[in-house]
Image: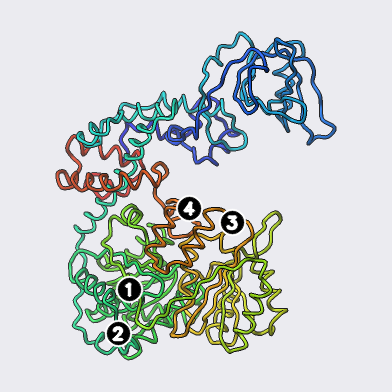
Amino acid sequence: MRPEILNPLFAEVDTLDGVGPKLKKPLEKLRCTRVRDVAYHWPDRFVTRRPVETLDEAGEGEQIIIALTVTEHRSGASRRAPYRVLATDSAGNVLALTFFGRASYTAKKQLPVGEKRRVAGKLERYGDMLQMVHPDHVLTMEDAALGQMREPVYSLAEGLTQPRMASLAAQALEKLPDLPEWIEPGMFAQQKWPAWADALRSVHARDDETAKDRLAYDELLANALALQLVRADNRRKRGRALAGDGHLRDKLQLPFPLTGAQERSIREIEGDLAQDAPMLRLLQGDVGAGKTVVALHAMLVAVEAGAQAALLAPTEILARQHFETLREMARPTGVEVALLTGRDKGRARESILMGLMDGSIQIVVGTHAIFQEAVQYRDLGLVVVDEQHRFGVSQRLQMAGKGRRPPHTLSMTATPIPRTLTLANYGEMEVSRLDELPPGRQAIDTRVVGMDRLPEVVEAVGRHLASGQQAYWVCPMVRDEEGMEKAAAEQRYAALKARFDDDAVVMVHGQLDPEVKDAAMARFASGQAKLLVATTVIEVGVDVPASTLIVIEQAESFGLAQLHQLRGRVGRGSEKSTCLLLRGNQLSETGQRRLALMRETQDGFRIAEEDLELRGGGELLGTRQSGDTPFRIATLEQMQRFLDPATADAKLLMDRDAGLEGERGEAARVLLYLMERDMGVRTLRGG
């Protein structure tokens, strides 16, 4: 239960003066729904205004404060035309105060002809005329509010102004309670950090890096402590030890020897499964490193021990891919593998549900359908979560609730994750890394080609298909939208179908019906179709070894991790494969670095680190999903400086006061609620 001392901060934003239904909407767009959110909505920058007597003293582009006399109002010729108010300074110089849209109504009231006003804003030039577009302040000569020369500049949504946002921030700061200090005293003194409330006031008043660091550390410490608490809670749980005797795994007839990394990971997982405490392990693997084989070994351990195993995939395409692969590999063992998705209906679905309930189905693969209420297991012992960042915590907990006792959990990701973000996002898990590729895999020939050579590329694809081989063509978006200068899958599909045999080309993207997507994928996987045009829906899990060419159009618009994933769709067999990165004519410096690195290396772990540097933590794993990084305050640079000490401090606090009952422990509880890491504090008895 949230401490009462925090209640003023978690009050709804409309408890602040001046916030009604109209203002709530733009605040919601800024994710400012409570007083706390407003307090943590810091200025992006600060502007210093210089008071001048005349326009002659000021330079173009300068922020100024000046007294003016209003001389004339000029309406535009149309509703969209600017509304201009002409005014003169003490020397007779003319300045146009320019307004657009509804702001013109305010201008008529604020700037009556013949009156003197003080205005503040940026001085610009429009043709031969000096102007100030949408002045930040228009005040009477008696108003003292413009005495402040340095002002915060907040990010806004339509309907909000800088003065209004500053007023709301000031109100939120007035409500800051006096909270106990949760930072370890030695760290606090060493960094010379201000107290929590002082730090928040400071970041709204000035560009204070020390205060920002302290507030970022608060967030990192809360996250690290919550993960430690979840981890400790998991260890307290009584799960079920799963120790297989090897009789099923001995029957496997894999066409290739396991790599050293696979063998190491299997040993680590076997060790976890043999413990009473439920396993929480993350298996990271580079593209094509063989995670599925490791997962199968883990699931067979569970079956050998008399339990069932379930593999949860984020999409139906990926679920079917896993099902086909696992069923084929497990065939010599005689283990029953089933597929369950949301599309399964009638007798087929009933048969699978009965098989899971009576235990005759030992391994099930599926989408979120496998943890719906109607699905019951005889004895679920292991859950494998593929592409686990695509699932919310609540979904994973639903799956965990399907066992008689908490099942073991193995999470997998196909994208190597930088160490910093592994610690930040998965600090409650043990981590295994597959950093070797299976023998026989050839390097993928990666080339960068300009879009001006598109006809040559199409001809090269034609020769490739004519030789009996298959290819992918990836576009960054589904269809051409007005104002978006990006290659679209639907237009490219139409053009390539016209160029090649109509039956040879199929298309897959996220807006197609599942039946249509599956049919296209089935035709491509069987070799009936030779060219698959797609968006990034094929980024993960699509495995067609016969495809040896991939063309990625407008490659500069993708992140490094995403390019690496897409390139990994080829090179999955023994044949030499090629990746063509089609680039636009105008490349940013970041785009050039990305494409150069793709040519230079195929090491996914190096690419992941570089990707983090180029994109920042907000696009973790190369996805465009929100919430991939758990931080709203800490920047990547702050994470790299403070994540290790925050994690070490969280471990130290847990070692000394696992129940968070001492003086600092109580303060840490307040921090967990303040930073909304409640899932950590709820694991405490009496939390």
- Residue that carries the numbered disc 1 in the rendered image: 436
Counting residues from the start of the chain, the first of labels 2 and 1 encountered is 2
Where is residue 625 drawn, in percent x and y?
49, 56
Is label 4 in a helix, a strand or a loop? Answer: loop
Where is residue 555 drawn, in percent x and y?
56, 64
Distance between mark 1 and mark 4 Cα atoms: 31 Å
The quadrant the N terminus occupies is top left
Amino acid type at circle 1 is Glu
Nearer to us of marks 2 and 1 is 1
Is label 3 in a helix, a strand or a loop? Answer: loop
Counting residues from the start of the chain, the first of labels 1 and 4 encountered is 1
- Residue that carries the numbered disc 3 in the rendered image: 587
Q: Is residue 324 left or right of residue 240?
A: right
Residue 254, can we see it?
A: yes
**Residue 65 location, quadrant:** top right
Nearer to us of marks 3 and 4 is 3
Residue 475, can we see it?
A: no
Which circle marks residue 257 in the picture? 2
Is label 2 in a helix, a strand or a loop? Answer: loop
Counting residues from the start of the chain, the first of labels 2 and 3 encountered is 2
Determine whether 54 is above or below 25 in the image: above
Amino acid type at circle 4 is Ser
Q: Residues within 10 Å of mark 4 (few under 14, many from 20)?
A: few
Distance between mark 3 and mark 4 Cα atoms: 26 Å
Q: Residues within 10 Å of mark 3 (few under 14, many from 20)?
A: few
Q: Is residue 546 left or right of residue 649?
A: right
Contact between marks 2 and 1 (CB within 8 A): the answer is no
Which circle marks residue 626 in the picture? 4
Where is residue 71 drawn, in percent x and y?
78, 15
Q: Residue furthest left?
A: 656
